[in-house]
Image: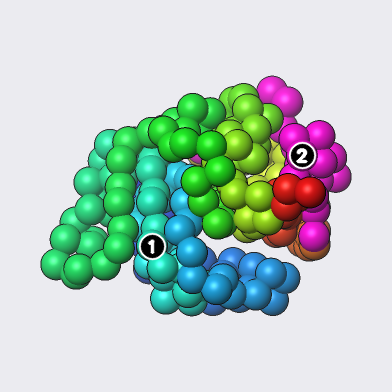
Amino acid sequence: MILNRIEFALMNNPVRTAVQRHCEVRQLLRMGGPLKGGHVLEIGCGRGVGTELILTHFGADSVDAFDLDPKMVALAERRFESRRLPVRFWVGDATRISARDNAYDAVFDFGIIHHIPDWRQALKEVYRVLKPGGVFYAEEVLRPVILNPVIRRLLDHPLEDRFDSGRFLKELEITGLEPIQSKDLFGAFAWFMARKKAAA
């Protein structure tokens, strides 16, 4: 689902950048630590802030990233156009990721999956494109926030079949991803680390 004007503004301002840099990233690093290089995917890249943090804070060698909104992809490309960094952006859908099986060492979700009506299919795609042993870093907004009457009035989210942290963890397992760690904040926001089991 493409963000409405209010959420587009909320996601494209210095406050959002600060929260992503100083809260979300720090929590995910505490839970899963940095990467040892590797080829990484970010789903729902927005204007490319997460892509930059994956390179600078998590230590990825290269990042592929996509967003459903062409305007967001254009902002991300502009953010990186003067820097020679190993990044690639495209317009894409998390329920049909344009990548081969077992392509990535890690996948990042900075609050995107709750925007996807068929979020279970998105998790299946994350599993498909991860290499065996690859890790999934996710930060998500949970059902009580999405169904809050004020939030519903201001922002556009799918309202049917939303998840709490327990449901998200269960679906990770059903998909074949092995939860490593999770943290729930007041039932409103949560962070997750999961791994695709290595081949026997």
Q: Quadrant of residue 152?
A: top right
Q: Position of residue 25 (x, y in %)?
A: 56, 70
Question: How many numbered discs sit on the rendered protein?
Answer: 2
Pick the residue in front: 102 or 59: 102
For the record, the magenta segment spans 155-180
The answer to whether residue 82 is above or below residue 66 is below
151 left or right, relative to 5: right
Disc 2 designates what residue? 176
Element at badge 1? strand
**Is residue 169 one of those drawn in magenta?**
yes
Q: Where is residue 85 in the image (x, y as percent from the top left)?
A: 26, 67
13 left or right, relative to 187: left
Q: Identity of the amino acid at label 2?
A: Gly
Residue sitting farthest toward the front: 200
Pick the residue in front: 147 or 96: 96
The disc at residue 141 is: none
Pick the residue in front: 5 or 11: 11
Q: Is residue 134 visible?
A: yes
Element at badge 2? loop
State yes or no: discs 1 and 2 in contact (Cβ < 8 Å): no
The residue sitting at 55% across, 73% down in the picture is: 36
Q: How far apart are marks 1 and 2 (CA)?
A: 25 Å
The residue sitting at 63% across, 55% down in the picture is: 134
Q: Identity of the amino acid at label 1?
A: Ser
90 left or right, relative to 134: left
Disc 1 designates what residue? 62
Pick the residue in front: 35 or 164: 35
159 left or right, relative to 109: right
The residue sitting at 47% across, 51% down in the picture is: 41
The residue sitting at 77% across, 39% down in the picture is: 176
Point out the tag, 1 or 2, that comes first from the N-terminus. 1
Q: Where is residue 146 in the image (x, y as percent from the top left)?
A: 65, 39
